[in-house]
Amino acid sequence: MNTVLFAIVAYVLVQFAIGAVVSRRMASESDYILAGRRLGAALVTFSVFATYFGAEAIVASGGAVYERALPARSSTPSAMRARSASSVSSLPARSGCAG
């Protein structure tokens, strides 16, 4: 077994172990979903930001690659923002709706 495979398997097993230990502290499904109402404002803010950025990256990257046949590395949200003004201004010409 090579070291990379061993590291991946070890990581997955540690994650399962952490999940098993933490799951014993959950009293109900509501306690799990709301994190026991013990999260601070900073952690909630970072969690919402991470969720938004992750969803934006997945949806926007996939849509840009499909629409423009871009290589995946140039379709990250930050790269797309840099091109957003030029993309919007050229939309009528690209879609054949130039007035």
Image: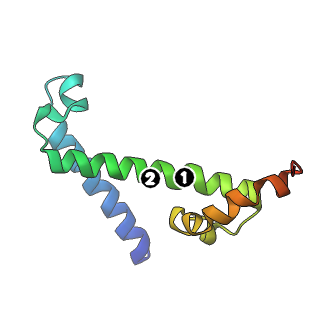
Per the image, the residue denoted by label 1 is 58
**Residue 6 percent coordinates (x, y):** 37, 69
**Residue beneath the point at 55% across and 64% down:** 81
What residue type is disc 1 on? Ile
Q: Is residue 27 above or below residue 83?
A: above
Q: Between 82 and 2, which is closer to the camera in this rendering?
A: 82
- The location of residue 20, given as percent across then percent down, is 21, 41
Total numbered badges shown on the rendered structure: 2
Residue at coordinates 71% horizontally, 59% vertically from top-left? 89
Q: Position of residue 42 (x, y in %)?
A: 17, 51
Q: Residue furthest bottom?
A: 3
Regarding mark 2 in the picture, which secondary structure is present there? helix
Crowd rating for badge 1 (residues with CA inside 10 Å; few <14, some 14–19, many 20+): few
In this rendering, position of residue 79 left or right of residue 42: right
Query: Which quadrant of the figure contains the N terminus?
Result: bottom left
Q: Is residue 59 visible?
A: yes
Q: Identify which residue is drawn at 50% across, 51% down.
A: 56
Q: Would residue 89 be found to the left or right of residue 82 on screen?
A: right
For image coordinates 18% across by 22% down, the residue present is: 28
Label 2 neighbourhood size at 10 Å, few (<14), some (14-19), many (20+)? few
Residue 73 badge: none
Q: Amino acid at mark 2?
A: Gly
In percent of width and height, residue 75 lies at 61, 65
Q: Are marks 1 and 2 in contact (CB under 8 Å)?
A: yes
Snapshot quadrant of residue 39: top left
Q: Nearer the viewer, residue 12 or 95?
A: 95
> Horizontally, is 50 left or right of 98 in the view?
left
Q: CA distance from mark 1 to mark 2?
A: 6 Å
41 vs 89: above or below:
above
| Dot label at residue 54 | 2
Q: Can residue 25 be seen? A: no
